[in-house]
Image (cartoon, rainbow, N blue to C red):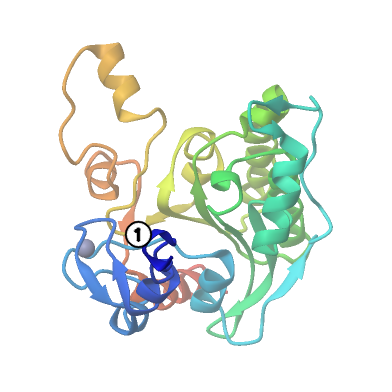
Amino acid sequence: MAWFEKPPAPPARMATDAIWAVCAGCKAYIARAEWNAALRVCPRCNYHDRLTCRERIDLLTDAGSFEELNAQVTFGDPLRFVDANGPYAAKAKATAAKTGIGEAVVTGKARIDGMDAVLAVMDFRFLGGSLGSGTGDRILLAAEAALAAQRPYIVVSASGGARMHEGIVSLMQMARTCAAIAKLQEAGIPYISILTDPTTGGVSASYAMVGDINIAEPKALIGFAGRRVIEQTIKQKLPDDFQTAEYVLEHGFIDHIVDRKSMKAFLANVLRYAGQ
Ligand SMILES: [Zn+2]
């Protein structure tokens, strides 16, 4: 009785994904090979797609030079938080297993064009790149490593903001990370912040904005509160490009917008200029 059998399963989404990438900026279909060759930057609209922390590290550092620090530092669950989807701890553990990283940031020492530096690279896949106590710990410890080694510190942000599951402990990370960075700045050690899509909430309100130089990728969403919240509060319509890297640059919050393909060379120039 074949006529009432289930139709065959549609081809797996993976098969489509292997051939085409869909640009989140302009919705164009781009051949996956072309998309990857362009470092996941849209050839039509220059949208810079999100990268994983490992991809970003590969892009910015000399091959084989990255040595991870404090990989054992992981999330805390001070409130034993449970929401409608279950316990936060279980969700964080599952995310760690899936992504292979124990927190929303990976930190380590590396070389950039032969110059030593300490890096912290956020990963949006880990609970929206949210800033929890483990994230704060890793960023703070990496700043201390930069201070001890007297090497420049570079943080690449990608975050939806504070990790609400950790309540006030999450918000405290804004002050802790900024205090650690202030020590670097007192010691005259360069601190470079790179803002990628998206850098919002508590991260944009703390360490992402206090770089000696703040650099963004084109079209990155950069802001504090969401557009809708602001529009409802001030009862005004905001411009279309509000909270884009370009808008934020025009209003003086960041110093440069640099294309992904030029970012490593740009960083190397900044490091050389800073006398590294
Ligand atoms: Zn596009």
Position in image of residue 121 (x %, y %): 58, 60
Residue type, mark 1 in image: Glu
Which quarter of the rendering shows the C terminus?
Answer: bottom right
Give residue 97's quadrant in the image: bottom right
Horizontal arrangement in the rendering, residue 244 relative to residue 26 (left or right)? right
Residue 272 visible at all = yes
Position in image of residue 79 (x %, y %): 79, 24
Say which of 122 and 251 sits in front: 122
Say which of 153 and 23 sits in front: 23
Give residue 267's quadrant in the image: bottom left
Residue 275 visible at all = no
Q: Which residue is mark 1?
A: 217
Q: Is mark 1 within 8 Å of ligand 1?
A: no
At 67% across and 77% down in the image, what residue appears? 66
- Name the outermost residue toward the front: 1
Say which of 95 and 118 sits in front: 95
* Quarter of the rendered image showing ligand 1: bottom left
Position in image of residue 216 (x %, y %): 37, 56
